[in-house]
Amino acid sequence: MVTAMVIVGGATRLTGSGLSITQWKPLLGALPPLSDAAWIDVYHRYQATPQYQFVNHGMTLANFKPIFWWEWTHRLLGRAIGMAFALPFLILAAIRGLPRRLIPACCALFALGGLQGLVGWWMVKSGLEGRVLVAPERLAIHLGLALILLCALIWTSLEAWAGATTPGRRRRDGWRIASAALALGVYVQCLLGALVAGNKAGLLNSDWPLMRGRWIPIDYWHGGVVPTLLHGASAVQFNHRLVAYGLTIYTLSLAVAAMRSRIAGRRIQGLCLGLGAIVIVQVGLGVATLLSVVALPIALLHQLTAAALLSLAVSLAWASGRTEVVL
C-alpha cells in the first residue's frame, strides 16, 4: 500500500494535480464533493491559486475534476493506509498478540505515517503561496519520508517473520557495511530523483548520454551551492545521472563479489543478483523516461522500479546481519 501511495503520488505530480485541493481536512476531507454547489466551491478555491492564474487560467470545471480526483485518491489512499495499519495493530496489542520486541517499532511506524500526512500538507502549502508548483526540497522531503516508512515496514516485517534470531557473525561485517552503503546510496538517489521531478528537469534535458550536446551542462551553476543543488534544473539532473552511474557500477560489483564469496550465503547471493538485474532495468527506464520527455507510464514504472530496488537493498542489509535468514 505504501508503494502504491508513492506511485499514485508520482502520477498526481506528473498530471499537475497536487494543488487541486487547497484545504487539509484529515477527517471530513475523506468525502469528495457530493453536490454541484460543493464542486463549485472547491473549483473556486482552486481558481484563487497561483497555479490556476498563471498555468491553468481558463480551465473549466469539467477539466478540473480529473486533477481533483487524482489528488483526492492520493489522500484517500493515505487515510486507508493509516486504518489498515492502526486497526490490526490496536487489536493485536489489546489481545497481546504482538511480541514485545515489535511494539516500539510498530508505534514508530504509526507515528511516521501520521507525520507523513503533515509533511504532505506542508509540501502542498508551498505551492499555494506565490508558487505554481510545490517547492522541490519539500517534495524531496515528502518522498524521502515515505521511503523511510517503506524501509521501516520492510525491516519490521522481516524481523517479525524471522523471529528473534541471533545477530550475524563477525565475518559478515563487511557485507553489513557494503549492503548498508548500497541502501543509503539508493535512498539518496531517490531523493535526487525527487529534485529532478520537482524542478521539471526531465523536460529540460531530454537527450542522453549528453545534455543538450555537452557532457557537463553549461548552465550547471545556479548562483550558489544551495540554489544549484536544490533548484538548478540542469544541476539536479546531472547529479542524478552521475549517482546512477556510480550505483550501477557498485551494485554490479557487489553482485560479482557475492557470487565469488564463500561466506555470503545463497540468500545474499540471490539478493545481490536480483539487485544487479533491477539496477540495469532501472537505468534503462531512466533513459527511456528522458527520451520520451517524461511519458507518464514510463515515468511511473521508473518510480516503481526505484521502490523495488530500495526494498531489495534494505532486505540485503537486513539479511547481512543475520545468521539465519528467512525471506
Image (tube, rainbow, N blue to C red):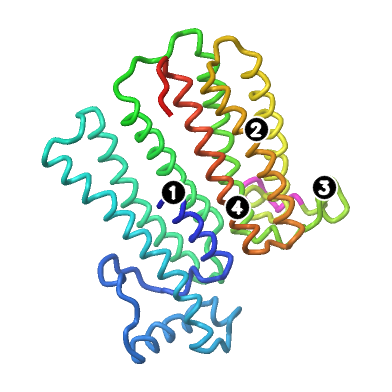
Badge 4 element: helix
Label 2: which residue?
A: 276
| Residue 64 can be seen, yes or no | yes
Packing grade of label 4 (10 A; few <14, some 14-19, many >=20) is: many
Residue 128 in sight: no
Above or below, 91 against 201 in this view is above
The magenta span reads: 220-226
Foreground: disc 4 or disc 3 = 3
Residue type marked 2: Gly
> Gap between marks 2 and 1, in whole Å?
24 Å
Whether residue 225 appears in magenta in the rendering, the answer is: yes
Name the element at disc 2.
helix
Judging from the image, what secondary structure is the residue with disc 3 in? loop
Q: Is residue 150 above or below residue 257?
A: below
| Residue 285 point in image, percent of width and height | 69, 50
Instruction: Name the mark nearer the viewer: 1 or 4.
Output: 1
- Of the numbered discs 2 and 1, the one sitting upstream in the chain is 1
Q: Secondary structure at mark 1?
A: helix
Check the image and name the residue furthest to the left: 95
Residue indicated by mark 1? 146
Amino acid type, mark 4? Leu
Measure the C-alpha gap from mark 4 to mark 3.
20 Å
Horizontal and vertical percent for residue 142?
46, 53
Number of numbered markers? 4
